[in-house]
Amino acid sequence: MGTFLSLPSQQEFQDLAEKTGFSLEQIGILHRRFTQLSHGEATLRREDFKTIQDLSCNPIRCQIIEAFFDKRNLQKNGKGSVQEIGFEDFLTIMSYFRPPRLHMTEEERAGMRREKLRFLFNMHDTDNDGTITLEEYRHVVEELLSRSGALGKETAKAIADAAMLEVASISVGHMEPDEFYEGITFEHFLKIFNNIEIETKMHIRFLNMDTTTLCT
Amino acid sequence: MPSPARTLIVGSRRGFWLVIFICLSDTALPLREASAPSCTDNSHGDPKLPRGTANSFETNHTKRSFPVLHFNYEHVRIPFEISLWILLASLMKLGFHLVPGLSSVVPESCLLIVVGLLVGGLIRVGGEKPPVLDSDLFFLCLLPPIILDAGYFLPTRPFTENIGTILMFAVVGTLWNVFFMGGVLYAVSQAGGPYLGSMDLVPCLIFSSIVSAVDPVAVLAVFEEIHINELLHVLVFGESLLNDAVTVVLYHLFEEYVGVDSVSVLDVCLAVLCFFVVSLGGVLVGATYGILAALTSRFTSNLRVIEPLFVFVYSYMAYLSAEVFHLSGIMSLIACGVVMRPYVDANISHKSYTTIKYFLKMWSSVSETLIFIFLGVSTVAGPHSWNWTFVTVSILLCLIARVLGVVGLTYIINKFRVINLTGKDQFIVAFGGLRGAIAFSLGYLLKEEHFPMRNMFLTAIITIIFFTVFVQGMTIRPLVELLAVKRKHESKHSINEEVHTQVLHHLLAGIEGVCGHYGHHHWRDKLLRFNKRYVKRYLISGERSREPRLVAFYNKMELRHAMELLESGAGAGARMPSVPSTASLQSFQSRVPASSRAAPQISKEVEAEIRNILRANLQKTQQKLHSYRRHTLVGDPFEDNLQERLLEKQRAELGRRMSVFLTDQPQDSPSRTRSRPPAATQTKARIPAIQEHLPFP
């Protein structure tokens, strides 16, 4: 079977802490969770994610799981996805969800915003071409409405169309009749979130104390 | 400005002040009549009656001339006076907005108190005793509309996200204020000697418990005008609502034990238990009435006219029921509004929704005005017993206790919060702790025999209220600008934001699942799923119960666009204001790669079904503006007399949009479409138009 996960040393944890910005306790807890999910192996695969109970009722679980294996999020070169991730990659993905620190300069804040929005963008842009096309957007809305049955597909189409129109009008303004709106680029994507402070909304609380034994 | 307009404005202003003057003299007149000596016999003392009637009691049926004109004021006295007061209050409010620039410098609450002082002064000069703000009137009639308005339009998302912080401030903060202030006052009074006279501990404590609670009416009145960001608004406002339970318990506790020397541990335990009973009981009572209201609204589809009545009556019953058991009426009202709102909004017609919104805003506005005016009048009425030491010490202690409390609590809270509260936030929270009429009414309820220094208390309470409302209320706006506190974003929620907010919510819930940590998102997700699966089915009528939130939002947005089209394009043949021309969408569609262009046409049945769905949704959706601010109701484009034209426009617009969405080929060359007027008779020829009349229920 696969290699058993050896307990990383304090030094490795220290390196990871500096790289990703988590504290040592948080890394310890996440490591325990990683071990639990991977059943003692050194890497996680997609099947391991499917065992998580809470994800099963999540409408966008496929995209979430894909995001873990996306090379762009793992800050590796190249496009496409990997088949398995190690603990360091796991931490890298988790670091996208850290809350902003208390004393951050404006640039640091803007940088964090861009990173988080980049993560969201990559989640939607499944074909790695740098834009969210109408098809991809429709797919997103369909997933969101996937629990409404037959109504979902048609309304999803209408909603996605209206949303693209709106982005076009925000980003490009008035368009000539023969101009063509390719898709949402990353810059346009940023504009959508002008009014939402993403750095204060897109975060989860990373505990310093262990409660993972209570959950599946 | 051209001169005829100017003279008109000046003339109208002069006329306005003339009306005010007449009103004031009218107010004084009935009060004088009211206290006219002794008998209520209507024929007494009035010179207008023909003399014959005065003798009609003594003599038996002597013939008298038929009285043409009667004067019977006593019959209508009470409703007449109430109406006059309300009229006065509303005219005052109107007046403030006529004077340019006044309302941007001085908050309305201050102006209204000043008006109250003037009116009180006038009445006293007229030789009468000015009326005092009756506590029953206040708690049973004036306060509930304001709280219901606040609770019904409470922004639930930020409220629940910060509920921990809010509870800390409300409960622990108020307790700290009470005991710190009470303790120090007691110490000062023991040491102060001749100036203060010695007061027992319990009167000090009850005084501080009355004064310590932040008042929702005052907070609303001031914060509505300064538009700070949502987080701070919800923190201060939520605190002012939730500290009611603490105030109620402490007030009754100290009132019970006023004569007792020592307080045992059992009493303290009972008090703590009482607190939980009061707060949780209040919430439970409110939630029960809320569910009842939601259930009732499910069946009102045939009788739309009385829908608003159910909302109001159930909420008021929730308040009164809680008051019967001395539970926290405010928390009950808030719970009722929060629980019933999502279901009632889904069930009632659009007109009922507008009615509820407008009535609530109107009543709460009038209530607030009356409260502040009466505060001013009651100040003139007295009785007062001014004691310099007591008043200055209590004001100082109020400020110090508040600042220390906020700073200390924030230090503790920041250890548990993910987004910390900065120094600026703390300052606004501390500075926004205004006291108001609740404190006055509670003080007024104190009985003289238990509390001999009640008048001194009342004077101090009034001074503190004046201080916080005037000084803090007036300076908070320039301070907010000086400190560059983040303001509220006045943006309309777009469909993109809604889609991405939902994506974000699911993403965060999923990541929490991966981390194995049950946080805020996880529980919220669970609650939403529970709501969808079990609760909505019983409380929402028809097929709205299965409508996902995104679809509801989309329909609302489409409606809003159609409305905007109506507003801007009425007769002018203008284009759609906020959505790019269909021409660009056509080019967008037409450049779809060839492979998907070969996709089959949507069949006629599906087309008809889609049209049915969209039409059905149009019939049922309502427009919801973020309306938790009272003073500036966003202009509601739903006017009755526009409805017909609106429906015409909607039909045309819907036809045009659908023809683009459903067919792949552009129906017309872009430039020709744009040059045509938006009545779009062209589209009616292409696809079968929606023939049926779309009634708004």
Image (cartoon, coloured by chain):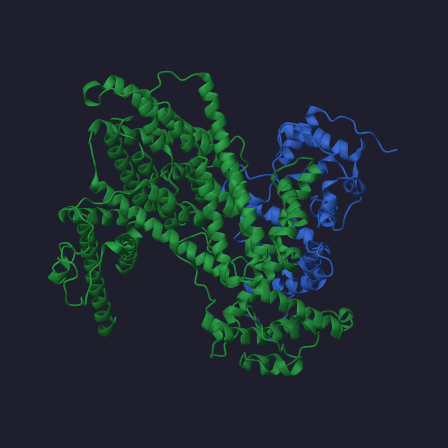
Counting from the top left corner in percent of width and height, residue B5 is at 25, 72
Q: Position of residue A30 (x, y in %)?
A: 69, 32
Q: Is residue B328 visible?
A: no
Q: Quadrant of residue A85?
A: top right
Q: Quadrant of the N terminus of chain A?
A: top right
Q: Is residue B55 above or below residue B117?
A: below
User: In which quadrant of the rendered image does the C terminus of chain A lie?
Assistant: top right
Residue A59 in the image, given as x and y percentages of width and height:
71, 50
Farthest residue, direction front:
B60
Q: Residue sitting at 66 percent across and 49 percent down?
A: B532
* Residue B474 seen from this side: yes
- Of residue B184 and residue B695, the one placed in the foreground of this image is B695
Q: Left of A138 or right of it: where is B160? A: left
State whether residue B365 is above or below residue B251: below
Depicted B470 relative to depicted B186: above or below: below
Furthest toward the right, the residue is A1
Chain identity for the colour blue used in the image: A
What is the quadrant of residue B240 in the picture? top left
Q: Nearer the viewer, residue B280 or B677?
A: B280
Q: B245 left or right of B68? A: right
Looking at the image, residue B371 lies above or below residue B185 = below
Residue B665, percent from left and from top: 70, 77
Q: How many marks?
A: 0
Colour in which chain B is shown?
A: green
